Amino acid sequence: DAMVIQNPRYQVTQFGKPVTLSCSQTLNHNVMYWYQQKSSQAPKLLFHYYDKDFNNEADTPDNFQSRRPNTSFCFLDIRSPGLGDAAMYLCATSRAGYNYGYTFGSGTRLTVV
Amino acid sequence: EDKVVQSPLSLVVHEGDTVTLNCSYEVTNFRSLLWYKQEKKAPTFLFMLTSSGIEKKSGRLSSILDKKELFSILNITATQTGDSAVYLCAVVKAAGNKLTFGGGTRVLVKP
């Protein structure tokens, strides 16, 4: 089945140790998003790729970077995770256009120790 | 600044009750409004609404959009314990392809 897959489901990292989360999709959607969702809060958009074009949200910290080497894969790099970066990270995809919805991956729950 | 506001923040009902969730928005260049259900995992898509006054229905869930008054409602009839979740409303703007989420409504259905 076509889907959005995030790995790993759970990630524990040490304070300050770089970590990479991955997202892959078989939907051939041209837009991919990374959202951060902290406990009891709504998802907050960090950035998105429209094809190869990277779009950063104004309030996304520099600590967060992203790569999209091809249509199917997108990575979220956290260069120096702090305790405040512990959250669920959600990848989503869409096909740009008026009537297309969004598909979310199952998320990666990041713990910083 | 774009705003999506959901109410109530939370509610507790008993099985069989009907619930109505509200989502109001203030965004420029509105394109569509989406409803999601989120349990302890990623959000699950429920509805996409683009036109005013056309009800979308899926089983016991239904939703409608009012583009004049800038709100949407999500109804759940004959609630079941499996309906317990956070329900998220999100708006898509015509420019760009980003979702702006409301804060969510937490629904607890008691047996």
Image (cartoon, coloured by chain):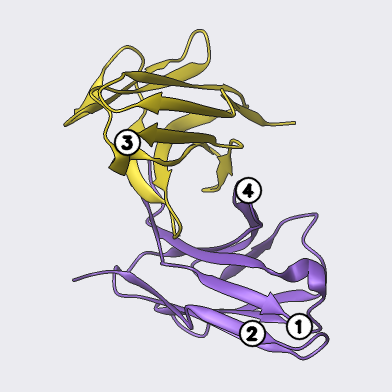
Chain colours: A purple, B yellow
Label 4 to label 3: alpha-carbon separation: 22 Å
- Residue under numbered circle 4: A40
Quick one: label 1 or label 4, which is nearer the N terminus? 4
- Residues indicated by labels 4 and 3 sit on the same polypeptide chain: no
Q: Residues within 10 Å of mark 1 (few under 14, many from 20)?
A: few
Task: Give the Cα separation between the discs numbered 2 and 4.
Answer: 20 Å
Q: Residue A110 location, x and y as percent? A: 62, 75
- Quadrant for the C terminus of chain A in the image: bottom right
Q: Residue at x 31, y 34 (%)?
A: B111
Which residue is found at the position 47% from the left and 27% from the top? B12
Mark 3 vs mark 1, foreground winner is 1
Label 4 neighbour load within 10 Å: few <14, some 14-19, many 20+? few
Of labels 2 and 3, the one closer to you: 2
Q: Which residue is under mark 3?
A: B47
Q: Which residue is mark 2?
A: A12
Q: CA distance from mark 2 to mark 3?
A: 34 Å
Residue B102: give x, y in percent of width and height. 59, 35
Q: Quadrant of residue B100?
A: top right
Tell me the amino acid under the disc marked 2. Answer: Val
Residue A60 placement (x, y as % from top left): 77, 61
Secondary structure found at label 3: strand
Mark 2: secondary structure: strand
- Kind of residue at badge 4: Ser
